[in-house]
Image (cartoon, rainbow, N blue to C red):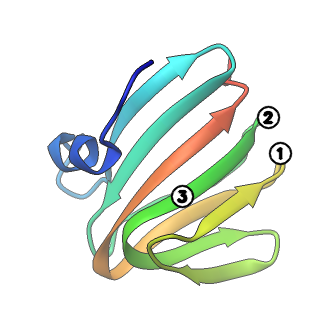
């Protein structure tokens, strides 16, 4: 068994640049990859597609997620599921947004 604190991992993750969201791989096995994102106000993960199922769990803050149905507001406790090859993205507005993404199976 492995126990993780994704909120703390997100807090400790260094952003690649000041204008880019911080991210860190939490767990990585062939069946699934867990990635935590910390988006500061105004930052985004641009819409993109994955050949895997993607499930976003909002851990803290608020923001918008995008998908086939357009943009939706999210808050802590919300879970958003995307089908394989469905375009998806996220962005923080006035508040920090912390999201745990489960990607299954792990992308090649």
Query: CB atoms at circles 3 and 2 under 8 Å apart?
Result: no
Question: In the depicted view, which residue is nearer to us: 48 or 4?
Answer: 4
Q: Left or right: where does residue 72 sit relative to residue 7?
A: right
The residue beneath circle 2 is 51
Whether 51 is drawn above or below 54: the answer is above
Q: Helix, strand, or loop for circle 3?
A: strand
- The residue beneath circle 3 is 57
Which quadrant of the figure has residue 3?
Answer: top left
Residue 89: image quadrant is bottom right
The quarter holding residue 39 reads bottom left
**Horizontal and vertical percent position of residue 106:** 66, 24
- CB atoms of marks 2 and 1 within 8 Å: yes
The relative height of residue 38 versus residue 76 in the rendered view (above or below) is above
Residue 65 sits above or below residue 34 on the image? below
Which is more foreground, mark 3 or mark 1?
Answer: 3
| Residue 85, disc | 1
Q: Residues within 10 Å of mark 2 (few under 14, many from 20)?
A: some
Image height of 1 relative to 78, above or below: above
């Amino acid at each position: 068994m492995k126990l993780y604190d994704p909120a703390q991992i997100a807090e400790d993750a260094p952003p690649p640049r000041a204008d880019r969201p911080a991210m860190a791989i939490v767990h990585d096995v062939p069946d699934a990859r867990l990635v935590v994102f910390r988006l500061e106000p105004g930052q985004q993960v641009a819409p993109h597609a994955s050949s895997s199922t993607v499930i976003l769990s909002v851990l803290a803050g608020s923001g918008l997620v995008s998908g086939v149905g357009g943009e939706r507001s999210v808050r802590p406790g919300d879970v958003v599921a995307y089908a394989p090859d469905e375009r998806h993205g996220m962005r923080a507005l006035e508040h920090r947004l912390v999201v745990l993404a489960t990607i299954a199976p792990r992308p090649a």
